[in-house]
Every structure is written in structure tokens, then in C-alpha cells.
Amino acid sequence: MLTEKQIQKLSDFIKPRMSKKRYTHSVNVANEAAKLAKKYGVDEDKAFAAGYLHDCAKELSQEKQLELMKRSRFPVDKIEFSAPPLYHAVAGAVVAGEEYGIDDEGILAAIRFHTIGSPSMSGLAEIIYLADLVSEDRDYKDVKRMRKIAYEGLNGAMLEALAFSITDSVKKGNSIPPATLMAYNHYIEKVKSIKGKEGK
Ligand SMILES: [Fe+2]
Ligand SMILES: [Fe+2]
């Protein structure tokens, strides 16, 4: 469990960086991530902190986000560079590392991939991706179904979440980053092989 002081430190860092609405979202994602972490045997404190921090760069100017993104140690695809709504994930990992002082690679990767996913996500990264999609403040059409699926197995939930995200991008006429497609293929194979082993 994080101490009250550690939670206060997260709150003091995040709160001035965003609107009230996004702050509520951040707290909700942190709580949801901790719940999912408990369910799946992932470090709850790391999940809570990563959830709290995941959108820390979202309300910076686009120029600032781009500048931070260019400094990232994570590879960034050219489709991401052409999609400003995706900047904040890469930029957020830089802010969490350089300004908040997170040195845990797992937390940084979870923040970096919470928008596009990746075929090599850790349990922690999967949890942040899912918590962002099903947190209490979300109210899109399929959210109830997604909430249920999130607690029925990480691979199946990731597959469903990625399919949802890809379908949404197709509908909007947006490009899809290669990492997202590779992640989708990764989880579809994983789910198939699990079903194969179970003889379904
Ligand atoms: Fe985000
Ligand atoms: Fe978010």
C-alpha cells in the first residue's frame, strides 16, 4: 500500500496540471488499475501510481507535448507523430520520469503505451490500458460489457479493447499505428492458443 504521503505527492503533482474533470479521471484510473492489479497479481502500488500519472501530459500544449515526445527514449512511429491526441502518452512518460522522478521502467512503459498498446506489454501495461478504458467516469455505449470483460482475463480483455480501438479508428478514418495492429495480432494468437489448450 502506498502511504498517505506518497498519494499526496502524486496528487500535488497531478492536480495543478489538469482540469478537475481530468483529475477525477486520473484518480479513477488509479483506483481501477489497483483493483485490476489485485485481481491479476500485479504490483498494486505501481498500478496505482501509473494510473494516476498516465495522462499527466495531456493538458500541456501540443508543441510542448511534441517537444517532449521527441526526447523520449521509446521509439515513436511516424503515424503517432501525425496524430496529436496520441502525443500525451509518450510525453507523459517523459514528464513522469524527468519531473516526477519515476525510474521504474515498467511504470514508464505503461504510461507510454496506454494509447496505442504494443505486442510486448507487461501485465502492468495491460492493466493501465484497460483501466483507462473502463474507469468509473467512462460512459460510452459498450462500457458495461468492457468492464465485465476486463475482469475475465487479461488476454481476452486486451483483444477486445484493441478490437474496439481499431474499429473506432477505422470508423473515424484514422490511421492505425503498427504497434496497435501488432498488439491485436499478438492477443488474437494468444487467445487462440489458450482456447486450443483448453480444447474449446
Ligand atoms: Fe490518455
Ligand atoms: Fe486517460
Image (tube, grey):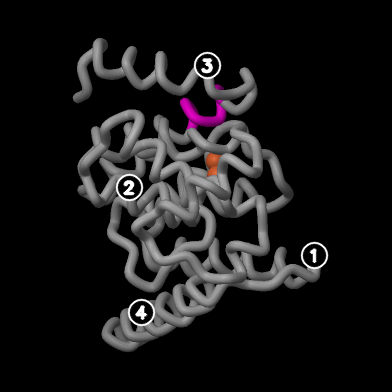
Name the residue beneath numbered marker 4.
190
Label 2 or label 4, whichever lies nearer to me, is 2
Q: Distance between the residues labelled 3 and 1?
A: 32 Å
Instruction: Identify which residue is drawn at 40% across, 14% down.
Output: 12
Q: Is residue 158 shown above or below 115?
A: below
Is tag 3's residue or tag 1's residue first in the polypeptide sequence? 3
Residue at image location 32% in from the left, 80% down from the top:
194
Say which residue label 2 marks: 108
* Quadrant, the C terminus: bottom left
In the rendered image, the vertical position of residue 52 relative to residue 112, given as above or below: above
Residue 155 lies, in percent from the top left, at 38, 67
According to the picture, the residue beneath numbered tag 1 turns out to be 172
| Sequence-first tag of 3 and 2 | 3
| Residue type indicated by callout 3 | Pro
Please name whichever residue, 104 or 136, is drawn nearer the observer in this view of the structure.
Answer: 104
Residue 102 visible in this rendered orientation of the protein: yes
Mark 1 belongs to which amino acid? Lys
Q: In this view, does 172 lie to the left or right of 15?
A: right
The 10 Å Cα crowd at callout 1, few under 14, some 14 to 19, many 20 or more, is few
The residue labelled by disc 3 is 16
Q: Earlier in the sequence, mark 2 or mark 4?
A: 2
Region rendered in magenta: 23-28
Q: Distance between the residues labelled 3 and 4?
A: 41 Å
